[in-house]
Image (cartoon, rainbow, N blue to C red):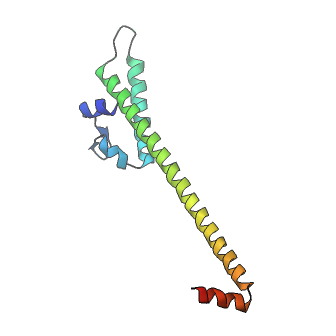
């Protein structure tokens, strides 16, 4: 799909014309609006077609553009979810390390003076 899009040098309407590579940097909300606009164009072209006329290059390009946009949004949403999950795990890990440090301090506070002195001497 991407190879076909690149070979055809597909361009998308966003602040002028943008290439397939540029789509990766466009906000997801804008990509969704582009998709909706292209889907409306496809419906308009499809309604104008008859059973006796073959698919035109325009509908093929529209199908390819829609597929490219759909895939880019899917990938970026998956990446965003993975980043969110990693951030949550890192936050949870930080909390657990803080609790471990607190427990270790509590354990040291409970030790006698002789035990603490022995620990210092062992260092």
Q: How many marks?
A: 0
Q: Position of residue 60 (x, y in %)?
A: 33, 23
Q: In the image, is 100 to the left or to the right of 54? A: right
Q: In the image, is 53 to the left or to the right of 9? A: right
Name the quadrant of the C terminus: bottom right
Relative to 32, residue 62 above or below: above
Q: Nearer the viewer, residue 108 or 34?
A: 108
Q: In the image, is 71 to the left or to the right of 100? A: left
Q: Nearer the viewer, residue 59 or 72?
A: 72
Q: Nearer the viewer, residue 122 or 58?
A: 122
At 44% across and 47% down in the image, what residue appears? 28
Relative to 52, residue 57 above or below: below
Relative to 60, residue 118 above or below: below
Q: Position of residue 62 (x, y in %)?
A: 35, 28
Q: Position of residue 54 (x, y in %)?
A: 33, 12
Q: Quadrant of residue 66?
A: top left
At 36% across and 7% down in the image, what residue appears? 52
Q: Position of residue 56 (x, y in %)?
A: 31, 19
């Amino acid at each position: 799909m991407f190879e076909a899009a690149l070979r055809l040098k597909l361009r998308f309407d966003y602040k002028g014309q943008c290439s397939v590579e540029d789509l990766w940097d466009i906000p997801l909300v804008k990509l969704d609006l582009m998709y909706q606009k292209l889907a409306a164009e496809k419906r308009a072209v499809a309604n104008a077609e008859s059973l006796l006329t073959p698919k035109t290059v325009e509908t093929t390009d529209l199908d390819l553009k829609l597929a490219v946009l759909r895939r880019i949004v899917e990938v970026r949403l998956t990446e965003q979810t993975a980043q969110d999950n990693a951030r949550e795990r890192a936050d949870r890990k930080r909390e657990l390390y803080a609790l471990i440090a607190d427990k270790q301090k509590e354990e040291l506070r409970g030790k006698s003076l002789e035990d603490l002195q022995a620990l210092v001497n062992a260092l």
